[in-house]
Structure formats: structure tokens, C-alpha cells
Image (tube, rainbow, N blue to C red):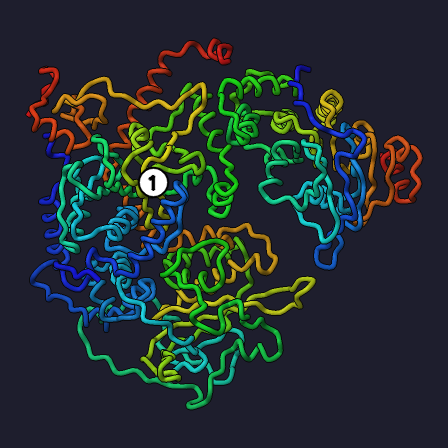
Amino acid sequence: MIESPHETGYNFAYLDEQTKRMIRRAIMKAIAIPGYQVPFAAREMPMPHGWGTGGVQLTAALLGPEDVLKVIDQGADDTTNAVSIRQFFQKTAGIATTTRTDEASIIQTRHRIPEMPLKAGQILVYQVPIPEPLRFLEPRETETRKMHALEEYGLMHVKLYEDIARHGYIATTYAYPVRVEGRYVMDPSPIPKFDNPKMQMSPALQLFGAGREKRIYAIAPHTRVASLDFDDHPFKINRFDRPCALCGGEGVYLDEVLMDDRGQRMFVCSDTSYCESRRAMGHGPVDASAEPAR
Amino acid sequence: MYVAVKGGEKAIKNAHQLLADRRRGKRDVPEISADQIREQLSLAVDRVMSEGSLYDRDLAALAIKQARGDLIEAIFLIRAYRATLPRLGYTQALSTATMQVERRISAIFKDLPGGQVLGPTFDYTHRLIDFKLAAEQEIASGVEAQAQPGAPMPKVASLLGEEGLIETASAADGEGDPTEMADITREPLSFPCGRDLRLQSLARADEGFLLALAYSTQRGYGRTHPFVGEIRVGAVDVEFFVEELGFEVPLGRLQVTECEMVNQFVGTDTLAPQFSTGYGLVFGHCERKAMSVALVERALRAEEFGETVQAPAQDAEFVLSHCDNVQAMGFVEHLKLPHYVDFQSELQLVRQLRKDFAARPAQGAEKASVK
Amino acid sequence: MNAPNRPELSQDTELPLMQVRGLTRYFGARPGCIDVSFDVFAGEVLAIVGESGSGKSTLLSLISAQLKPDQGAVHYQMRDGVNRNVLELNEAEQRLLMRTDWGFVHQDPAMGLRMGISAGANIGERLMAIGARHYGDIRSAAQSWLTCVEIEPDRIDDLPKAFSGGMRQRLQFARNLVTQPRLIFMDEPTGGLDVSVQARLLDLLRELAANLGLAVIIVTHDLGVARILSHRILVMRRGRVIEQGLTDQVLDDPQEPYTQLLVSSILQA
């Protein structure tokens, strides 16, 4: 057992070693069957379900004293929940933390994949609210498990068909379902579909934890991850028609920030670490007229 | 301005400080102690203990204090704490038949061996605000009486059982080796699930949710024709079998509330008509909860008795997946977390859809152009 | 009728498409179905008739593998020509059979359709379930099947909710026919419809079955429906088949007193 250097009373990284072993076994199984949801006996964590208890349990089971942890929520390191989770591990494990994507060995995320490509050896831990991609088509767990077992995914395409028939394109913008290694259909957590292509053949290990629903699943490094689509309506991502107003970054996901009550808004990088590192390298607004009012 | 939308560590710290301040309230009012909560708000303590699944009145009282009286928040504190406790072993099954009874009533027999013992109950109070309580006053100590002192108090179910009128617990219910019992805190719930997992889930389920479901069965959504066979509240011994010693040693006592509902069952081609049961057992004195558990438990056995499953209270996946208030409060309240990345995607989509809508030709022409 | 042609099958037309042998099923002490045996050939319409409670719906559930019998076998000549006992297929195989080579038309369209999604998606679902991934192709298949069942193709994006009772039944046909099944089960498909709507539906059914070479097993309490549609007929009473034969023969010259009673009650009505 690793001694906790910090807060008294709790084990290193909060969870007891038995629980960590149970979670690691579930992780191993999940890696062996990419995209398959492995049930595990999630514990009650000291933060509410839905606030990242699945991700926190994965991170707790993975952390060693040498790890460097980055936590983001909505792409940002300084959103309240990211701060709270980062502090939790600083307190219970005393490990080093960072906001830089390239420095982190473990990145816990809610709703985004960092803009900077991940490297081999890094682990991306997703917080997942509803792990079952078929849930809103079929509410019953007994039935959805059967559908996965028998690879009955027709209903998923029925939904996409309806979108196209109604709107002319697939109107799912986040939590866009993917098929992993040609087998399991998987919910990538509520990341914008903009981030979906980053999962494909990533050299990093991607782990997904749903605490309330008690499921862990994984995408092993270098695994095929295809977003569901039709041959004649291929998967497309939403591009922004402007660069980041702060760093001038293009081809990145932007947050829309309301500036006043007269409809003034600006668009800035959702990945704050990426934005800061670009600005540190001397990049700035592309167009002077887009300069934010400060 | 841009920075303002990001939370930051300072905001969290300030919020926590403010919370502590509000918890204390006006400083000229004396601070409440956990002891006072434990002794004087004991039913709240019992609810936190039973839904928190940890038998510790002091801790439950402290949790209530810390949670400013928000019981679900207090239950959550207890749950999170208990999750870190090591699992040393499993005790022998509790024997409620040998309970040291403080209250015991049956609605199906006027009198019965051991008698009816009302105990401390609101049942026959008039719900009139007692203004005298606003002032401190001396309260005389209660008279504890047993109807027939010293007489054994057999379980009502066992009285009926002698005639074969009521089902008896089967081996499938988990009688026997306690280590073979499922453990809701150590394995995920999966469906279909056995009676052991079902009863464990219901024992820690939200009282309000179960109360409403139980009520719905009485109003016809999954009728079970229930009678209160017996409710007993009292202390039971906890015994632990020590391998090295070869015998059971007592670890202490728990106060529990047990409810056995007796329900109509007309039988099938293979089963003779007999009464069936719904069962509820919870920590502390939580009578309404124990009754609700027993009613819902029986409703959930519909399939077992060949009854048509059509009401919410009969649907195990529905009931057991949504009965835990710690899970429910977390997921409902997580909507407060920022969702602006997803919302941004939706914004883009709605703008696109509106653009398409404005640009579309007249209704008739569009229909014809669909290929 | 411009239905697409069915792919080549290695089908032995000499052998029955389905052979039912000794099917028995009790519900507790009550018999649902006792020792029922019969054959169905490709392209043949077989009617199962009887009063309610006679066991005809139980029989339909048994042969369509939705209910397990206590005894008996249901042999089916699969698309590859191999004869298999349907009851011994695993669940994945049964489900595949159910959504490709078989169809099921329910009396209540809400059971056979997804009422919350468009007609086009209702028809396309089976195609997507077996791997169709070209939106345009799925859509044109849906349109051509709508035409086949006499629904205007421009109703393709409407919900079944917006359809009349007769149209919903026709949509059920299209939804089933899109994978070009060889056998369709039908449970009182005209029940609850107006007489004029019924007549039109029966016409369409007869035409479809003939043109597509469909085998149909139809359960009905209505001897009139059986006479119009079926080649052969099974009469059930108290779980047993009491008489079977060519439809005209059985209805014009019933041998069993019970069948005679059934037929005469129709004539009187």
C-alpha cells in the first residue's frame, strides 16, 4: 500500500487498494474488448454522481506518485468542477498537476478532447453521464445488452435516417455515437462531434468511466473509431467560420462569449491551455477588429 | 470580461466560506450540537442512517449538522464515508424473531402471542401544533410496558406458516450461508436481480420515492391486496462467526424496523392458494419506510407469481434503477455544471436549422422535390 | 407492381417451406395447443381458423418462435436450402430470420410499426438492421414499397399517426416486405377495419402474395377472409386441429360437425 503523504485518514488517491484493484481489473477487460461497457461496482465518491465520479474513480485507480495530472471541464482547466477535482487529487494523493496537455500523464476530461494531439503513454479519462448509446432508443438495460450482444444496431441508423429525412443532415451535435473497431457502438460521452475524429487511431489510451451507471469502457491505443453515418451522407464536423479572438487559432473548437446585452459576442478557444500556449508563443488576434473589449 | 466566465479556485473558496457562515446562522442563537440532533431529532438521524447504509447515530447526527438539515445531502455524506471503510466480513443473519421489542403491532389479529405493543408512535396523536413545546419544559420519562411481560413474541408469519397458509422463505432468498449473498455495495446491480439485491436496494432507497410507489399500488397501479402482518421495532444482536474460534461472537446491537406485509395470492395451476409476503427491513426506527419497502417489494415479485407486469411499481428495472436518492440527486443537480461546449454545438445547429427553414421554398414545392 | 426481384435462392420447391410436427404447449393445466402438425409450401396461403380461445394465436406464436412449445418441432427451409428446426436456432439466428426471411403483420398496427418515426424509416429499418448504409438507396426502396402497397410515395416522411387504419396495415406490409421475405405470419390483419377498407386490403394482400410468391400463414376468426385469401385451411378447436384441407373443400363440404356449425353460422350472419 502506498502511504498517503497528505490529508490524514484516507489512502493514497482516496480509494482503498482493494477497490483500485477491482477497478483496474475492469479497465483491463475494457481495453481487451474496446467499446464494450464493463459493469463495475462503483463506489460512492465524495462528489455527487454526474459530477465525474466515474472519471474520478478511474483516475484514482490509475494514479501513481510519479503521475502528472491535468483536469479539464468544457476544455478549460479553470472551470469550477475541474478545479474541484484537481484539488481533490492534490489533497488525497499529493501528486503534481499541470494545465499543459503535453506535460500530463493522465488527463481527466468532461466534454472535450484537448486540441493538441495526444501522445503514446498518455491516458485520457472521460467522465460519462449515460454510457449506453442505445438508451434513448430503448430504455431497458436487459434489452440494450442483448442488442449489443447480437450487434443489432439498425435502430441507431433509423435515428440518423430520420434526421436526414427531416433536416437534410444528421442533427446530432454532441455525444455522437461511434463504432469501435468494427464491433461495439459506443457513446463517446458528451464531447462535441467536432472532437470525434481525434479518437480514431489515437496513440493515447482512452478510458471512459460512468460512476452512477457503474460502467467502464475503453479505446485501446491505435484503435479504429468510426462515427456512424451513411455512405452518401458521410460524417462531417462543424467548423467555425472564424479564428479564436484571443490567439487567432483556426480549426479549433470555440466558445461563444456574450459581451453585453446588445448581442455583442466573441469566439474564443474552448481549450484554454491551447489558447494560452499559442499566445505565449506570440500568436494573437488575426483581425484587429475582433479585438475583445477589455 | 472573458475571465469572468471562468470559475476559479477563489470563487469556490468563498462559496465554502459563505456556506459555513449560513450553516451557523445568527450567532446570538446557541450552536446546535451533534448530541442534540442525535437525541432530539432522532427520526431524522435514523433516516440518514438507513438510507446512508451505515449504522452510526453520532456520525449521522454530525452529517445532518454539516448538511444544514438537508437530509439527502447528509445521506450522501454518510455514503461517501462508508465507501472507504474496509470490508472485514459478513455477520450472521439477524434474528428478528428474538428481537428485544419496543414496538410490535399486527393488523391481522386482534390479539396474538406476545401481544400488541404500541411503543412510541405518532399514530394516535392529534396533529395539533403543541405551542407549549416552544418553551423548554420537563418531560416525564416514558412508561415502557410489555403486554405480556416475559412472554415469547413469535413472528406472525410463523404463526400462519404452521398451517401452510403463507409462503415460507426459500433457499433462493439467500437463507443459509451469508457469504453467498449478493452485496449491493460490492457488485453492480444487474437485471434480472434476485430478492437479496432487491431488498438491499430498497433498504437504502429514498423514502419519498418508495412511499409514492407504495401508494400507487394501493390506488390500483399494481394492486397487491396488502395487510400489515406485523411491524416490529427493537434491538437485535449482531453476531459474527469467527473461523479461528469456531463459534459466533456477539458484536453489538442494532435497532431495526421490520415490516411483513401479507398479500393475497390465489395460486396457479402448480401452486396452491396461499398468502404471499412483502418484506422490509431498515436501520433505526423508520416505520413508514419499512412499510413502503414491503409494499413495493411485493409488487416487484409480480412476475414470480405470474401476475401481469404493467404498473411502474412492478417494474424492477424502473424501480431499482431510480430509487437511490444519492444517484438521483447527483445526476439531476449535475445540470448545474457548465454545459457550454455542448450548448455551443446546439446553438450552431439551431442557427443552421433556422437558416434552412428561412431559405426553404413553399411547402408544396418542397414535398415534390424530395427524392 | 414493380417490386424488386428476390435474389436467387437454392430452394427446393418440392419440399415444404415449413414443416410443423407435433407442436404441443400447455399453460399450466390448460392446453394451448395439442399435437399440431402441418406443412406450408412456398407461395401458399394457409388460413388457421377457429373461435377465440381455440388455440390459433398460440399456434402462431409457436411457429414464429415467439413462444417455446413443450413438445414438437418447426422445420424451415432456410435461404441456403438447408432445413433447420427453428426452435433450435440460437436467439441471434431467430432474430435474423424474423427480420429477413420472415415477416409478421399484427392486428394492432401499433405493435408492428414504430408509431413515432416516419413511414420511410419504418420501411427502411429492416434494411438498416442488415447493414444497408446508403441513405438514397434506402429511401428509394421505401418509396417503391410504398407504391406497391398503394400509399402515395410523397407520404414517406409522414408519421404512421397521420395514416388511416387501412394505410397503417398497408405500411406494415411494406415494412415487412422490404427484405423480400418468403413467409409472412398474419394475426387478424383486417380485424377492426371497416368492411370496404377490409375488402381493399384483402385484394391487395391476395395480389401481393401471388405476385411475390409469398407463403402466408394467416390467423383469422373470419371464414370470409379465409375463403378470399387462402389455398388451404386448418380448423382449430380446443387446441387441436380438427379438420384441414383445401379451402373450398372444407368450407363447401365440412366433415366435422363443429366446422359445419362454424360455416353455417357464417351463412346465417
Q: Residue at x 24, y 52 (%)?
A: A60
Q: Nearer the viewer, residue C93 or B339?
A: C93
Q: Residue at x 14, y 25 (%)?
A: A260
Query: Residue C80: x, y in percent?
Result: 67, 32
Whether residue B31 is visible here, answered yes or no, is yes
Q: Residue at x 14, y 45 (%)?
A: A97
Q: Quadrant of residue C75?
A: top right
Q: Residues within 10 Å of mark 1 (few under 14, many from 20)?
A: many
Q: The disc numbered 1 marks a residue on which chain?
A: A
Residue type of the residue flagged with mark 1 = Ala
Count of numbered marks = 1
Looking at the figure, which quarter contains the N terminus of chain B? top left
Query: Residue A205: x, y in percent?
Result: 29, 40
Q: Residue at x 55, y 15 (%)?
A: C154
User: Relative to C31, is A210 on the left or the right?
Assistant: left
Whether residue B71 is visible here, answered yes or no, is no
SS class, disc 1: loop
Q: Nearer the viewer, residue B318 or B139?
A: B318
Query: Residue C164: x, y in percent?
Result: 61, 25
Q: Which residue is mark 1?
A: A220
Q: Residue furthest bottom?
A: B150
User: Relative to B270, is A116 on the left or the right?
Assistant: left
Query: Residue A32: x, y in percent?
Result: 39, 45
C150 to B146, vertically: above or below:
above
User: Relative to A64, is B237 on the left or the right?
Assistant: right
Q: Quadrant of residue A223?
A: top left
A33 to B250, vertically: above or below:
above
Q: Nearer the viewer, residue C195 or B158?
A: B158
User: Relative to A46, is C251 on the left or the right?
Assistant: right
